[in-house]
Image (cartoon, rainbow, N blue to C red):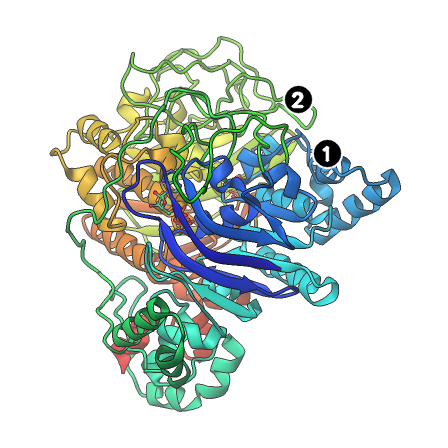
Amino acid sequence: MIRFENVSVTYADAATPTVAGVDLTVPEGELVLLVGPSGVGKSTLLGAVSGLVPHFTGGTLRGRVTVDGRDTRTHKPRELADLVGTVGQDPLAHFVTDTVEDELAYGMESLGLAPDVMRRRVEETLDLLGLAGLRDRPIATLSGGQQQRVAIGSVLTPHPKVLVLDEPTSALDPAAAEEVLAVLQRLVHDLGTTVLMAEHRLERVIQYADQVVLLPEAGAPPVMGAPADIMAVSPVHPPVVSLARLAGWTPPPLSVRDARRRAAPLRSRLAGASASPAPGASPRTPVRPPAVSSIAGRAQNDPRPGVRRLLHRLLRRSANTPPPATAIPGGPPETHRPAAAGGEAPDPAPTGGRAHPHPPAAADGEAPATGGPAPESPTRTGGADRSPRPARGQAHPQPAAAGDGGAPTTGGLAPDSPPARPEAGRHTHHRPAAADGETPTTGGPAPESPTRTGGAGGNPSPAEGRAHPHPPAAADDQAPATGGTGGSLAHPHPPVVAEVWRLGVRRGRVEALSGVGLAVGPGETVALMGRNGAGKSTLLNILVGTVEPTSGSVRVGGGLTPHRTPPRELVRHVGLVPQEPRDLLYADTVAAECAAADTDAGAAPGTCRGLVTALVPGVADATHPRDLSEGQRLALALAIVLTARPPLLLLDEPTRGLDYAAKSRLVAVLRGLAAEGHAIVLATHDVELAAELAHRVVILAEGEVVADGPTADVVTSSPAFAPQVAKILAPQPWLTVAQVEAAL
Ligand SMILES: Nc1ncnc2c1ncn2[C@@H]1O[C@H](COP(=O)(O)OP(=O)(O)OP(=O)(O)O)[C@@H](O)[C@H]1O
Ligand SMILES: Nc1ncnc2c1ncn2[C@@H]1O[C@H](COP(=O)(O)OP(=O)(O)OP(=O)(O)O)[C@@H](O)[C@H]1O
């Protein structure tokens, strides 16, 4: 159904192709999973199928990609819209309409489907994806996971033959991810839909894949094969495969169920082992994969010399895997790509979160398809961006603070819109007075200089001591004598770094938080978990002052009320890496972002850049942040905030787009900060990350704290939050492969 014929893609100004030697077929009616490290070119390959590469990204595509016989070089994304449905990494960039229901109908309208068919499919999809309660909601007011569900729903309604999905479960809670994957599997099995999907959280998806395409490194040809064969040698693999490599199970099981069947001997070996160390206590260490005969056979016999070489290399590597770094690795970037040209022009079209103003690349003798910004009417697969990215320094128009469901999503920036630049005067950041939800805004906020590091940009509140727009009802003054109502401390932490009491937050019609109590002490790492829309991001935004409580109190940094603290002061106490890392970025190159971050934080020059390299090696200084892959961009945002080393570090979904190696490097960095006394609060759906890193897990449900306790207790009490190792070795108490390895 999808055919790549000797495809390579070279982005404008890049010295070498990002992907090369791609020659493979995705058969009709199969779900094929595309895996590989961050920045290796997965989104690039997906873009070549939907036509976004090179039509909207610029660059040069050599070879041929056909979808059901249609050549994506000669068919623009709009001309593929009836055939291919695409969900990019940044759904917000692709939304065309304002409300959930309209968005679900849009693709069908463009294809001219009959109204009764449209109506039926919208209803089906609302139910299928748990969106019925949100049908009238402005999309801009949805949580990240709710938006991702709408994005998926909107490509399902036209029933395309081919679905191209770039990390479709990255913002979904574990249960929602399972539901979405079950829906996709049904489409594949019952309707013969072809799905090509890139995903990093392999523990979620691998068991659904018919075949896996591995991109082992940038520019290397992909290897395609049965999931177990590829996982046996892949540098990226889920915990179940790490455990299999440790225990010597070949071929590796891919599901918890299959692993449990083989785990009895391992369980008895572990039975006498000493108690499980606390999560986060021992760094994750690598395990050696066994050589796998079927891959070895292919390494001998594959007709393509490049692939043969690669398979040999993978086999060698898998038999001799170096430890994933637990310390910060150094080393110069591997590649150097000149800065993107023309950074000033407004982006004419989205490219899965990377709208691009590149001029078309120079044509060459082989008549490659060269891409440039092609002004098109919006299609979901293509130029669907009705709201081009704002110029640098402007706040992103994301979550408009619609007062309620019917509020217009006009150009005004929300009080809780994302943070911008720290340097006063360089980037003015205007915000309307409207407070989130129903809070009256008499008195008007004092315009403040925005701040990036603190995430408190354009804090709409007056400074401490000045008249506050809140009515007295939103009392924020008396701290209770005891630890609050909603949550209990696992252990006392005098002094606390952050604390909320009886916190209530209304956002539009939604009671986003109610009666929440929580205290976080120095050196403590707390994972906030819970369904999409449970209130996790809202709580982080409360702590950083970009959302104000409707009731109750919040204190950070030993007595500051975040929404009343000037950003410049707040940044010394608290930093947030938002769910959309792009919201922190404004400069034209990685190097400039990092230099600004060093200056803002008063850190030694090179601090931020060193962190970027440590997290994702191989990013060139001159790269425009817009041109980074999703994982690279997140690593840059993390590095910017980590440079300031705030005593309270808040991370909203910090592993979206990160491969396992980058994740374990991030874990190492965060553990180091916690050991030095930094408090860390992360909102995450990544149960493996929580198991690895958090001392404590707090589960929110519909705005309330429903569990709060040591990680092992909380995550093992519910299958939805249990990591793979816990499920495989239950009832024994192990959570991570590292713990098991240490015990053996
Ligand atoms: N429009 C562009 N212009 C220039 N370079 C680009 C562009 N898009 C991507 N790149 C570069 O190409 C490489 C591959 O990016 P891509 O997004 O395809 O990786 P990926 O495997 O999807 O990564 P991730 O897992 O982090 O999403 C990266 O180094 C990125 O910086
Ligand atoms: N500006 C807004 N107007 C109206 N409702 C809002 C607004 N912002 C958030 N909400 C609602 O508040 C609730 C909590 O949202 P929040 O973003 O805190 O959830 P979350 O737990 O972080 O979800 P996710 O896991 O999907 O990121 C959701 O139901 C969301 O739809």
Give the amino acid type for the residue marked by disc 1 in the picture: Asp
Q: Pick the quarter of the image with the N terminus.
A: bottom right
Residue 702 shows in this picture: no
Rendered image: mark on residue 16: none
Q: Secondary structure at mark 2?
A: loop
The nearer-to-camera label among 1 and 2 is 1
Amino acid found under the numbered disc labelled 2: Ala
Q: Is mark 1 within 8 Å of ligand 2?
A: no
Give me the residue at 35% from left, 16% from top. Answer: 463
Q: Earlier in the sequence, mark 1 or mark 2?
A: 1
Instruction: State which quadrant residue 3 falls in.
Output: bottom right
The x and y percentages for residue 429 are 40, 16
Circle number at residue 102: 1
* Residue that sits furthest to the left in the current view: 604
Q: Residue at x 32, y 64 (%)?
A: 279
| Ligand 2 closer than 8 Å to label 2 CB | yes
User: Residue 68: where, in percent of width, then height?
Assistant: 65, 55
User: Mark 2 Cα within 10 Å, few/some/many (few <14, many 20+)?
Assistant: some
Is residue 607 in sight in this rendering?
A: yes
Residue 62 horizontal/vertical position (percent): 43, 48
- Left/right placement of residue 201 relative to residue 160 reads left
Mark linked to residue 407: 2
Lateral position of residue 629 relative to residue 538, left or right: left
- Percent x, y of residue 647: 25, 39
Q: Is residue 398 above or below residue 114?
A: above
In the displayed image of the protein, which residue is found farthest to the front?
365
